[in-house]
Amino acid sequence: MKQLVIISGKGGTGKTTLAASFCVLASGCVIADCDVDAADMHILLHPETLASNDFYGGKTAVINPSVCVSCGRCVEICRFGAISKNFKVDLYSCEGCGFCAMVCPVKAVEMKERFSGKWFFSKTPYGPLLHARLEPGSENSGKLVSKIKKEAIETATRENKDIIIIDGPPGTGCPLMASLSGADLAVIITEPTLSGIHDMKRVFETAVLLKISCAVIVNKWDINAENSWEIEKYCFDNGIKLLGRIPFDKSAEKAIEDMEPLVKNTNSPAAKEIEKIWNKIQEEFFCGEKGEKNG
């Protein structure tokens, strides 16, 4: 079983469009949408939800009014201002640190698990999909990503699937690190802008720390050939495999409007390049010996 994760240093680089196209080309993989803060893979893959499960990602303070003696110690100690003067806890301000429970002299404060969202097991035409929806204002998305990854691995093992395609989150925080854990290849998709180049470097450095093999795809490379050359030079200097260059293509916007994977448009120049990239990934990383890890 191989794990392929598609990541980016910033949002809006085409990560989900690429991941959905890979799912179509793989035909029979397990799919994990690990961008739980803004999950949108389901928009392109039209899943049928088979199971829905609650996710509890942390704890929040609950004050029992029948035990509370109104001493005010919890209000004084809470640095987040989550407890009002009438000893009510604001769910969205409470960070779940538990100090209020520690200082309460009569044990009126209890730390209870907080409902943070749901995760789903769904069926798509291209394979099982594990995805989630984090509640607004909820945290611990890294923990939810780990849950999605765990379920995806168990599904692939149970159904004897060869590959898990993971749509990772943008950025370099805990959700990204949870997505990268155990991956065989991280495909970084970037764009030839100053912010795209900067964030590509940051996400690559994060993957190196986790000893994950990396490759790069330049999306919309032809909007700025000079910046695209800078990306290629950085890849060469750091021993990163450049998988391909996807041209700017208005059919990508049309595919999003139609809520369909781009690669299904066989006349699209971008779709043709994505198919070439997928074949290269299969040949160079998953069919023969795995490439040496960067770093």
Image: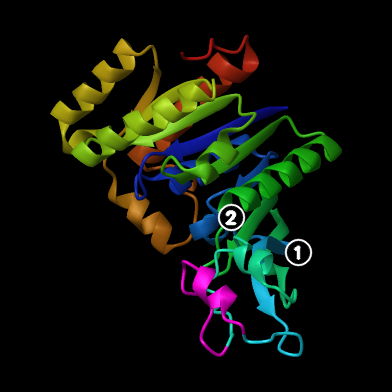
Instruction: Indicate whether 290 appears above or below 48.
Output: above
Depth check, front residue: 217 or 283: 217
Look at the image and tell me whether residue 56 can be seen.
Answer: yes
Instruction: Indicate whether 6 appears above or below 205.
Output: below
Look at the image and tell me whether residue 265 can be seen.
Answer: no
At 68% across and 77% down in the image, what residue appears?
62
At 68% across and 52% down in the image, what residue appears?
130
Structural distance between the alpha carbons of marks 1 and 2? 16 Å
Q: Which residue is mark 1?
A: 53
Q: Which residue is mark 2?
A: 140
Identified by mark 2, the residue type is Asn
The region drawn magenta spans 71-86
Depth check, front residue: 244 or 292: 292
Number of marks drawn: 2
Q: Position of residue 17 (x, y in %)?
A: 45, 47
Asked which secondary structure carries label 2, the reply is loop
| Residue sitting at the far right | 158
Identified by mark 1, the residue type is Asn
Q: Position of residue 180 (x, y in %)?
A: 56, 33
At 40% across and 27% down in the image, what residue appears?
204
- Which mark is on residue 174? none
Instruction: Indicate whether 109 appears above or below 199.
Output: below
At 51% across and 58% down in the image, what residue appears?
37
Depth check, front residue: 88 or 40: 88
